[in-house]
Image: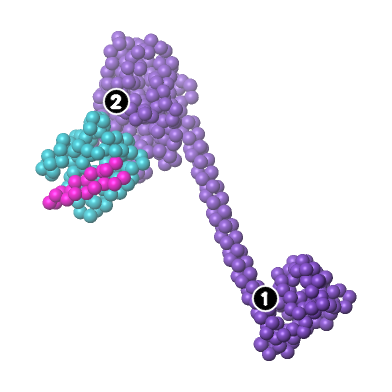
Chain colours: A purple, B cyan
Amino acid sequence: MEGILLSEGFTDLILCDGPGQAMEALGIGGGFSGGHRAPDLILLDVEMPAVNGIELCRIIKGSPAHRDIPVIMVTSLSQMEVLAQAFEAGAMDYITKPPRDVELLARVRSALALQQETEKRKAHETELLKLTQRLARAHQELVDKQQRLDEDLRSAAGIQKSLLPKGLPAGVAIPFAWEFQPSQFIGGDILNMVELQPGLLGLYIVDVAGHGVPAALVSVSVFQALLPSSGLIIQDGLPVPPVDVLGALDREYPLERFEKAFTMVYATLDMASGKLTFANAGHPRPLLFRADGSLEELDVASAPVGAGGLLPFSQDERVLSPGDRLLLFTDGVVEQPSPSGGGMFGLERLIEALASTRGLELGPWLAKAKERVLDFGGLSEPPDDITLVAIEFAN
Amino acid sequence: MRVDFRRFNDAVVAEPQDERLDVSSAAGFKGQMVDAINNGSLRLVLNLSKVQFIDSSGLTAIISTIKTLGPEGKLVVCGLNHHTRNLFKLTRLDRIIGVFNGEEEALKSL
């Protein structure tokens, strides 16, 4: 056999005399002592002293480092009955003794070819497995990122909520109420009322264009700019007129700075005289529900803050009487869509809803109006923040 | 948001094809308008016939377009509906942008 194989170029042969030598050469049951790499093919005689070929085959196939090496059993015709056992033990083929060179070479070559194919397939499988793992990792990373984004949005929404007035602001002795319904995305509505000096209140509502964290961040920044301590609404101890507050904000927040514009109404109210001074930057017109039942839309307007002085701002005045109610609201209220495609809630519906419930206290009056807006939108969350603010004058 | 551009002599008509110029389409709209301006279109008619609704983001995009145009450029609009006309009034944009009923009239004004 050695001669046949050598003559065909299979020169890297290890010849073992008996199972002990074979196991030693393969490194089974001890270190790999042969100094050779694992063989490509094992030819195993069934008949050997001490441990027979079938048992040795079983041992080889039971060793993790060797189980993939193909084993061809060499057997005499009279031992044909043991072939079943040999295949069961993991042999892949057999050759009868004495081997004919054509048969031996054909069997050896096909075993080696099969082995090569198997290895190739295994390499492919390993590659596929790696790809699958990489995909799984990439997917997990995306899931993690989404989770972080969701958390960020939740905290941003939390921050936006924390800006809402808690209870009645210090120094405010008139009924004041607001309703806020955040949209499905985080939006940019804020509102506040502050005491500018004893007997003079400042009131505002802001709607930053767009949604998401950028809009919310701009809201936070604007909220801080409008704190009495920031020097924008009170300068040198004196209240700044609404028209100048809008002008200062317009310079402070040019469109180019955050790619965001915002609409707002800023008003001051003198508690002694009832004088209301107001300015409007692109915001829906405030509604004045007079105690006598009449209604006025406060029509002073300009371009949104951020337009960069595209239009000069202006302000106007009214004198409030006890019982008069001033309502500020964001466009999310009137632009609340109907789920059936029946248009938007609209100003007419808002006025009708408020006029018909005029007898309610200020808080329930707003709550009822918000309920009507949300009912109009059906079950879906509103696409934009819905904000309503109202005061009732009393002196 | 797809915006169709048509050239008439040295004027360009820009016509947004979506029904809504809002938070989801404003950035795409603005990008195309700015590209057109940077390519030398300084006399623009914004035909809003197909636009049914503009929100504050859409309005911001229009203001941004006017600012990009600068003092040498001119922008007029046409094809407003009840809602969009009201928005232009509310924000006083109708005082700085010419508002026309039809495209032909708007082109003539340039």
Q: Nearer the viewer, residue B99 or A40?
A: A40
Query: The residue under label 2 is which amino acid type?
Result: Arg
Q: Which mark is residue A285?
A: 2
Q: Which mark is residue A111?
A: 1
| A224 left or right, relative to B55 | right
Across and down, in percent, residue A58 comes to: 79, 68
Q: Residue at x 31, y 38 (%)?
A: B20
Q: Secondary structure at mark 1?
A: helix
Across and down, in percent, residue B16 comes to: 26, 43
| A142 left or right, relative to A278 | right
Q: Is residue A61 visible?
A: no
Quadrant into which the N terminus of chain B falls: top left
Q: Residue furthest right?
A: A50
2 vs 1, front mark: 1
Question: Splitting the image into 4 quarters, where does residue A45 fall?
Answer: bottom right
Magenta range is: B1-18
Q: Is residue A88 visible?
A: yes
